[in-house]
Amino acid sequence: MISINKLRKEFDQGVVALDSIDLEIRDTEFVALLGPSGCGKSTTLNCIAGLLDVTSGQVMFDDADVTNKAPKDRNIGMVFQSYALYPHLKVIDNIAFPLKQKGVSKEERHKKAREMAVKLQIEHLLDRKPTQLSGGQQQRVAMCRALVKEPKILLLDEPMSNLDARLKIEIREVIKKIQQELKVTSIIVTHDQEEAMAIADKIAILDNGRIQQYDTPEMLYQYPANLFVANFMGNPPMNFIDAKLETAGEKLMFTIGESSVEVSGQLLEKLRPHTGRPVKLGVRSHQIKVGAEPAANTLPMEVQMVENLGKELLLSGDVHGCHVRVSVDDTSAFGRMKALVGDGEKRVYLRFADFINVFDSETKVNLV
Ligand code: ATP
């Protein structure tokens, strides 16, 4: 288990890279650190690895305080974006290198290197030099080298960012499989939300040196704690529609431009205390139904574009000044929809699914 308590890292000239990070990673768990460039992902990883001194706070592995321990005494394996292979060494000696440093005999370390190479399906490459390998193969060698000394913790810093889209999917499956097989507690740094969702048991979303939310991919996707997280998770991104919470007699309504939509179901209780507040409705493209006729509790959308994504259509357009994307499952409607836009009769009517997220426009916090 890894516990990080109130971790703070300041660089020279007062740059605060991490501001009081708390994180707990259970034994055998796979956690992703996700966030935009400069948010502090690599700094967090490097503090856990011991490659950076912390300004204050504590890093614990199980019950041991490792905050001031050297990297070599932490029993971690690490994979970097650049792979950092030794160009003059054969693959087998690259993989075996950490064991050589530990004084393991040549015969023994080659045996272990071979075993790990079999697991990652690169045993046929052991006599090559790194320059004779593809990017994906170099990545597997780097993984082998990180795992050969059977570390308790595996740290991965953007390990797939130099691979093309197809290879990324292949390698992330390899990483996930081997992580489960070896049951090694792992942390991956990435700025790719899809990669984080695919590979990790839990994701910590960082912004500006702070954790915005730490939860399972499903929870982050469904119940983002604030607008920052909501913006970061999901593709296409969540739609945000400006509204105001207002009462109409007994009813609570979202007022959106000249339209209004009644608040119902489980949202009612949660939102009533916020009556009068400006809010942003957070609605995913598949949480919206599209109709041709105006009706109560619908919103008009001026359709500007219809795209055929193969498994669904994506309509995009304007809803009272907010740009909105809507998924339509029935791809056979493509011709009809496209003709609609072409004819200039571009208006459709949107109805929300039962559950949507509602954010306070000022505090940016999710109210539901
Ligand atoms: P990226 O995705 O671009 O790698 P990141 O989320 O990993 O970004 P970090 O590299 O952890 O971000 O950097 C966090 C902050 O600390 C940034 O503002 C960065 O400029 C700053 N920083 C990182 N390393 C140093 C350093 N050696 N000296 C000064 N500032 C640094």
Image (cartoon, rainbow, N blue to C red):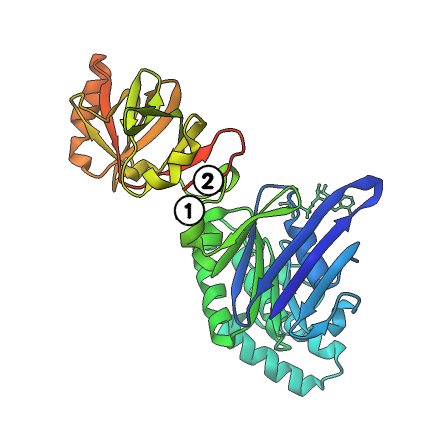
Q: Which residue corresponds to the image point at 68% horizontal and 60% vertical from the top-left?
A: 5
Task: Describe residue 46's horizontal placement relative to residue 247 as left or right.
Answer: right
167 up-or-down from 146: above or below = above
Local crowd size for mark 2, using a 10 Å CA cut-off: few (<14), some (14–19), many (≥20): many
Q: Which residue corresponds to the image point at 71% horizontal and 55% vertical from the top-left?
A: 7
Question: What's under tag 1, amino acid-wise?
Answer: Tyr
Q: CA distance from mark 1 to mark 2?
A: 8 Å
* Residue found at the far front of this picture: 250
Which quadrant of the figure shows ligand 1?
Answer: top right
Residue 237 seen in render: no
In which image quadrant can residue 145 be found?
bottom right
* Residue found at the far right of this picture: 13
Report the disc number at residue 223. Answer: 1
Work out whether residue 50 or residue 275 is closer to the camera in this orientation and state it.
275
Report the disc number at residue 366. Answer: 2
Q: Which residue corresponds to the image point at 53% horizontal and 29% vertical from the top-left?
A: 362
Work out whether residue 291 or residue 49 is closer to the camera in this orientation and state it.
291
Q: Quadrant of the N terminus?
A: bottom right
Q: Earlier in the sequence, mark 1 or mark 2?
A: 1
Image coordinates for residue 97, horizontal then vertical, percent: 70, 73
Residues marked 1 and 2 touching at CB (< 8 Å): yes
Task: Describe residue 34's horizontal placement relative to residue 44 as left or right.
Answer: left
Image coordinates for residue 269, horizontal then vertical, percent: 35, 41
